[in-house]
Image (cartoon, rainbow, N blue to C red):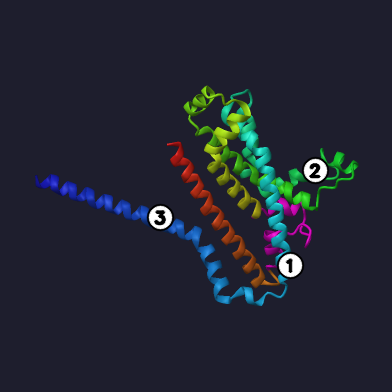
């Protein structure tokens, strides 16, 4: 019995050491991810960055532009992304994986490459932009370019979330609705949307937050024109060297908004998961 007891004790010590190692590595990873945000928050609060802003009008202009463009992006994403997500979640067709690949590609595409692709497509000499230019519509370096860039980068987040929401609806629910005479748009509006709305809202919030923080594609495709295309991330980039307090304050606004958006999105996602179970 004694050797077995010693073996069990050694195993416990080994498990305890392994657990400590896992927790130590996890704590280190958390610090790497959380430290920059915490330092920025601490620096902004300790220096009271909001009190010494020499040009609050610039921040207000960038903030209003960001909210206006991201609001338009959310509406555009919901209008175009919802049917697309529904088709991808319910129908099998040739080339479906190919379609899904290109929809999700902007999530991992380098921002500079995304901006270049948008310029080649919607620029004055672009594949689509040349036709728009002939009609008198100049897309680059305009508010429309900001909206297109934000939509291109952020829409995949909504489409993925909406796909999960639509796919989580049990087939029995729809079969029962068909027995009661619900078909087509009636099925979609009165059965599918009320069940999947939490996943859709979660995706909209994530999409909005991603659009709000978009930088790389926007600066290449829309430029950094104050009062015209300068969003909050572009403002942080522009004033970092000459006004660190303004950059910190704008960054704090973006962080707080992102945290609120992430918190709300996680709440809706958990509610959708509980409902699907």
Rendering coords of residue 169 (x, y %): 50, 32
**Separation (CA) of disc 3 from disc 2:** 46 Å
Q: Which residues are magenta?
A: 213-240
Q: Secondary structure at mark 1?
A: helix
Q: CB of mark 3 within 8 Å of CB of mark 1?
A: no
Q: Position of residue 130 (x, y in %)?
A: 86, 41
* Camera-side mark, 1 or 2: 1
Query: Toward which corner of the image does residue 155 lie, by quadrant?
Result: top right
Examine the structure image and report whether residue 118 is included in the region drawn in magenta: no
Front of the two marks 3 and 1: 1
Q: Position of residue 235 (x, y in %)?
A: 70, 63
Q: Is residue 219 left or right of residue 44?
A: right
Residue where numbered disc 3 is placed: 25
Of callouts 3 and 1, the N-terminal one: 3
Task: Indicate the quadrant containing the C terminus: top left, top right, bottom left or bottom right.
Answer: top left
* Residue 187, position as x, y percentages in the image: 58, 29
- In the rendered image, which residue does mark 1 sit on? 58
Q: Is residue 180 visible?
A: yes
**Mark 3 or 2: the one toward you:** 2
Residue at far left of view: 1
Pick out the residue farthest to the front. Answer: 180
Disc 1 from disc 2: Cα separation = 28 Å
Residue 109 can be seen, yes or no? no
Q: Is residue 7 above or below residue 175?
A: below
Could you tell me which residue is drawn at 54 percent across and 53 percent down? 262
Report the side of 166 relative to 227 (left or right).
left
Instruction: Rate crowding at label 3 as few (under 14), some (14 to 19) or many (20 or more) other CA atoms within 10 Å.
Output: few
Query: What number is the disc on residue 122?
Result: 2
Q: Disc 1 vs disc 2: Cβ atoms closer than 8 Å?
A: no
Separation of marks 3 and 1 at Cα, in angstroms: 43 Å
Most foreground residue, 213 or 8: 213
């Amino acid at each position: 019995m004694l050797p077995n007891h010693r073996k069990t004790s050694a195993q416990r010590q080994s498990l305890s050491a392994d657990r400590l190692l896992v927790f130590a590595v996890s704590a280190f990873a958390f610090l790497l991810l959380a430290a920059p945000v915490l330092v920025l928050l601490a620096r902004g609060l300790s220096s009271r960055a909001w009190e010494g802003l020499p040009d609050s009008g610039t921040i207000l202009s960038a903030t209003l532009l960001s909210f206006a463009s991201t609001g338009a992006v959310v509406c555009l994403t919901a209008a175009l992304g919802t049917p697309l997500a529904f088709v991808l979640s319910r129908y099998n067709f040739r080339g479906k994986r190919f379609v899904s690949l290109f929809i999700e590609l902007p999530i991992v595409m380098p921002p500079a490459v995304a901006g270049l692709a948008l310029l080649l497509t919607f620029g004055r000499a672009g594949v689509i932009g040349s036709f728009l230019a002939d009609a008198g519509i100049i897309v680059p370096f305009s508010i429309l370019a900001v909206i297109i860039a934000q939509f291109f980068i952020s829409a995949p987040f909504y489409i993925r979330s909406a796909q999960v929401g639509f796919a989580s609806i049990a087939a029995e629910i729809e079969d029962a609705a068909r027995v009661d005479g619900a078909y087509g748009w009636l099925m979609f509006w009165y059965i599918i949307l009320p069940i999947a709305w939490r996943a859709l809202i979660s995706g909209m919030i994530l999409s909005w937050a991603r659009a709000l923080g978009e930088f790389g594609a926007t600066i290449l495709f829309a430029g950094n024109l104050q009062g015209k295309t300068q969003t909050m991330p572009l403002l942080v980039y522009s004033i970092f060297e000459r006004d660190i307090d303004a950059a910190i304050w704008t960054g704090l606004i973006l962080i707080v908004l992102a945290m609120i958006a992430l918190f709300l999105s996680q709440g809706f996602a958990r509610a959708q998961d509980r409902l699907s179970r």
